[in-house]
Image: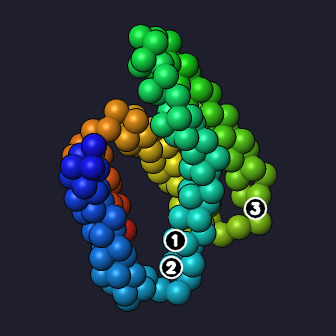
Amino acid sequence: MTKDFIKDIFKYLPSQIVPAIVGLISIPIITWLFSPADYGNYILVLSTVTVLTTLVGRLSMGIIRFYPAYERDKKLDIFYSTVIQWLFISVFGISVLFLTVLLIVKDCIFQNLYNLMLIGVGVFICLTFFQTLLSFLRAKRLVGWYSGFFLGKVLGCMSLDWV
């Protein structure tokens, strides 16, 4: 048990250290590449995507909490279908609500910010599905896969920031 715990710690370690290093490297580069106005728009969109993703994040907690019980009871098919159903309902509902609010305030914000917010909805959808996948990997204790996917996400997001 202790041996597995220590092994898992070393497998999780890169998924915690690399994002910190990427953050230290990418922030000066991003602030150098973007004007203050563009950087401000970037942060607004990033913050909005983070808030929207957090709203669906409760589903990830449920995956980690209830997966072992459904696996033990051999009812994973019910569990998967329920999670996927609620994932689609949540993502669709939040996306429609956000797009509606965005349409209402369209005339009150700059066109550039509006266009970036529309892209942010797509980013929200992708991140939410990705977070759900990561939650399943954690619940199944597939530590190596989790770390690999998480590092891929961090490096992929960093490369998108620079585009």
* The C terminus sits in image quarter: bottom left
Q: Label 1 neighbourhood size at 10 Å, few (<14), some (14-19), many (20+)?
A: some
Using the rendered image of the protein, determine whether residue 105 is visible from the camera's viewpoint. yes
Q: Are marks 2 and 1 in contact (CB under 8 Å)?
A: yes
Specify the label residue 39 is tagged with.
2
Image quadrant of residue 140? top left
Up-down relation of residue 88 to residue 117 (above or below)? above
Name the colouring of the figure. rainbow
Disc 1 marks which residue? 42
Real-space CA distance between mark 2 and mark 3, rounded to the nearest whole angstrom? 21 Å
Residue 142 image offset from top left, x and y in percent? 27, 39
Q: Residue visible at 62% across and 34% down? A: 90
Q: CA distance from mark 2 to mark 1?
A: 5 Å
| The image quarter in which residue 50 lies | bottom right
Q: Is residue 162 visible?
A: no
Horizontally, residue 63 falls left or right of residue 28, namely right
